[in-house]
Image (cartoon, rainbow, N blue to C red):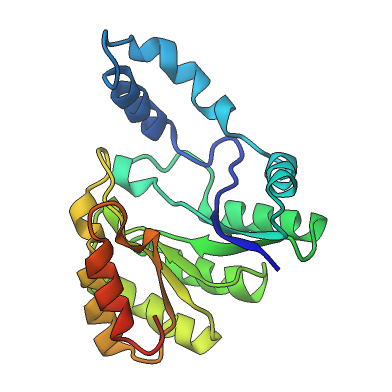
């Protein structure tokens, strides 16, 4: 069985408006001559919305892939805009997609651990909505060993599910330094029984660091 272990599926509102604003600014300056962000902004979201998963399934079929694991992204706090779709709403949507494509679509709960209701939403995501684990995205502004993350690791051990941690350099408006894979070593030391997956394996800057960090831990 061939599985795409790192896929994404988005509906409208899954990224807050402020994220699209910043993306338009970044893309406008990525070419020469620079473009007007106002010309880019209206086209961003429509380019990746896949409400019912049909686009993803067609791509899997073309590539001969049997199933995909969707990793949820919660990027609201990094741009200080909570007006988009909430993580709870995303996970319920993914649960419906999983029902539509049994055995072909699975999802992890992506929640910024700084959300006040984050731990409760995470537990419901696994127990009620069928999410298969936790996805953390440290470039939003926290290290994987920060105290705010610890209850989520403990909950993952209680639930018996793995944790995926983003370990790749990314650019503004994210802060890539939080994603350095050696930061996961503190988590490994504290939770030797926790199953940890290094998303992107440190690519493109820190592959060797990711390999060495993962290799020393029995469950990475």
Query: x, y percentage for residue 159?
Result: 54, 84
- Report x, y in % for residue 208: 24, 66
**8 to the left or right of 75:** right
- The spot of residue 210 in percent (x, y) is 28, 69
Image quarter of the N terminus: bottom right
Question: Does residue 58 appear left or right of residue 211 in this picture?
Answer: right
Tell me where residue 88 appears, x and y as whole percent: 57, 57
Q: Nearer the viewer, residue 165 or 18?
A: 165
Residue that appears at 54% across and 74% down: 123
Residue 52 seen: no
Taking depth in this image into account, of 207 and 87 the one nearest to the observer is 207
**The image quarter in which residue 117 lies:** bottom left
Which quadrant of the figure contains the C terminus? Answer: bottom left
Decide if residue 132 is on the left or right side of residue 54. left
Q: Nearer the viewer, residue 76 or 136?
A: 136
Q: Residue furthest left?
A: 177
Residue 214 visible? The answer is: yes
Left or right, 82 with reference to 213: right
Q: Is residue 199 above or below residue 163?
A: above
Q: Residue at the location (40% across, 84% down)?
A: 154
């Amino acid at each position: 069985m061939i599985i795409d272990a790192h896929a994404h599926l988005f509906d409208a509102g899954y990224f807050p408006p402020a994220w699209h604003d910043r993306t338009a600014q970044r893309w406008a300056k990525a070419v020469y001559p620079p473009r007007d962000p106002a010309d880019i902004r209206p086209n961003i979201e429509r380019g990746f919305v896949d409400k019912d998963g049909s686009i993803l399934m067609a791509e899997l079929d073309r590539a001969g892939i049997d199933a995909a694991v969707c990793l949820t992204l919660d990027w609201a706090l990094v741009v200080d805009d909570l007006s988009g779709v909430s993580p709870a709403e995303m996970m319920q949507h993914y649960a419906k997609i999983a029902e539509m494509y049994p055995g072909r679509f699975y999802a992890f709960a992506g929640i910024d651990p700084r959300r006040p209701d984050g731990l409760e939403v995470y537990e419901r995501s696994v127990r009620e909505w069928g999410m298969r684990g936790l996805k953390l995205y440290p470039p939003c502004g926290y290290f994987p060993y920060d105290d705010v993350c610890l209850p989520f690791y403990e909950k993952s051990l209680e639930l018996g599910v793995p944790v995926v941690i983003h370990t790749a350099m990314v650019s503004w408006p994210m802060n890539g330094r939080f994603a350095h894979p050696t930061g996961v070593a503190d988590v490994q030391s504290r939770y030797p029984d926790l199953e940890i997956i290094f998303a992107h394996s440190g690519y493109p800057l820190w592959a060797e660091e990711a390999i060495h960090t993962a290799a020393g831990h029995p469950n990475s």
